[in-house]
Amino acid sequence: MQEVNEVMLKSAEAFKQYRKVSGKQKATFLRAIAEEIEALGMDLIRTAMQETNLPEGRLVGERGRTTFQLKTFADLLEEGSWVEARIDTADLHRQPIPKVDLRKMLVPIGTVAVFGASNFPFAYSTAGGDTASALAAGCPVVVKGHPAHARTSAMVAEAILKAAQRTGMPDGVFAHLDSGDGFEVGKALVMHPETKAVGFTGSFTGGKALFDMANQRKEPIPVFSEMGSINPVVLMPEKLSQDAENVALIYANSITLGVGQFCTNPGLIIGIEGESLEKFIDVLSEEIEKVTPSTMLNAGIYKNYEGKKTITLAQDHVITEAISKVEKTAEIQGTATIASVKADTFLKNPTLNQEVFGPFSLIVKCQDITQLTEVLEHLEGQLTATLMATESELGANPEVVDTLRNISGRLNFNNVPTGVEVCFAMQHGGPFPASTDGRFTSVGPDAIKRFVRPASYQSFPDSLLPDELKQSNPLNIWRMVDNVFVK
């Protein structure tokens, strides 16, 4: 497509300059983006409300998270040690072979194509984590606007462009393509030779399609797709015997938070049959029946929710435990639903392992801890996994803990998976199919590492080295010099 080609060629030219921009200059750029987004005020919030059906409070909070992410990456760039500078100095007297001087650091890879998420119009979209981390890495960004919030995306894009102009960034460092003819635009972006990486948040179908396209190129490129998961929650019997009612209350809120439209929604709950599990189900059911149906993001997501929920509930031996008894007042309101099934059935039916995106959760009833472990080993890769247990149960069941750790990016203890903290220790990404590369996170400062690669300089004159690798360490960053971290 001509428009995509023109944008990508302009972006490639911008990369030649932007990759040389200092960390402090890029930090100023990111802070300016945050300021321009904040300057849009309530006009931005009202536009997003109209397009997404999300409430004002949720959107104000998400906008705050988005600007916080930008400022967090600015802090990272100003400090500078994120480049992981490694220096091994020369030893010309070493025998039998002299040792050469080698210096290594992380460098940007080139233009990143970003596909925004429908359920997060700010934090995972135009100026979200993918865009912020790519710009921080020194990579130009081309965003394909999401059709579910096209006007919101365009407003944020204009804020980024104003910030780029205001801070003297090279022309083409950021571009925004509208959501028209989405598939063809997306394909052209991924297949263009100047695209060097892709960031995506959304469905498995969409993320896998981009991944497959990228691997069919003459030059394959990395695709960092976060594709959701069912986020299993394990209810250990001792914990339930002590606290079944409170655990049920907590999870009634988590399952229905944001009409269940989070990639970390607890869609699968696994427990051992008995009086405590039945009490948990009774309390959870009572709470779910009281939940007022809320409007989902758009008609497409509502249709998908109802379709997948209907398929799941129609499977043999699946029991519907609870459905909200509060009457709907609008067509695309999602009705909270809880179902249950025996572990024997779950293990034989792959349909029950699929995500139902919305306020839905399936409870799997196991005979004993052995069968519970078998269910966990049956699961695919997840963004999160949660253990509701006593400390003694953790110590007595290491195989459960190890299995959950091996299939998930983030392992929770006596908490809920909904809610993703923006910090260094956060891992938002898990083994396939939760994401296309579980070694990386899409949330937190470490998200920058998706869009860089290591590069070594051998026997270079000190004056021609990047500041990060010069002998005098002019940036005063932490570096490993001859196997020791020093500043």
Image: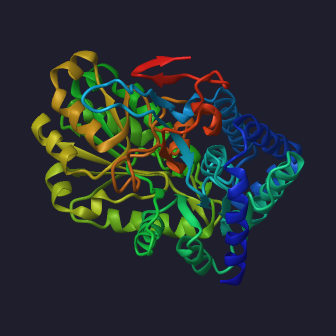
Q: Give the percent coordinates (x, y) of residue 16.
A: 69, 57
Location of residue 173 (image quadrant) = bottom right
Residue 24 screen position, x and y as percent: 74, 34
Q: Quadrant of the N terminus?
A: bottom right
Q: Residue at x 40, y 56 (%)?
A: 436
Instruction: Estimate the x, y position of residue 241 in percent, counting from the top left.
Output: 26, 23
Which one is nearer the viewer's eye here, 369 or 284? Answer: 369
Query: 456 or 357: which is nearer to us?
Result: 456
Q: Which residue of the protein is positioned furthest toward the bottom in this rendering?
A: 1
Locate residue 287 relative to residue 274 in the image: left or right. right
Which quadrant holds residue 414?
top left
Vertical comparison of 79 with 209: above or below: above
Whether residue 322 is visible to the viewer of this picture, yes or no, is no
The image shows residue 27 at horizontal and vertical percentages of 74, 37
Say above or below: 21 vs 71: below
**Taking 374 as reference, is 182 above or below it?**
below
Q: How is the image coloured?
A: rainbow
- Point 64% across, 31% down: residue: 76
Residue 206 shows in the view: yes
* Quarter the C terminus occupies: top right
What is the count of numbered marks?
0
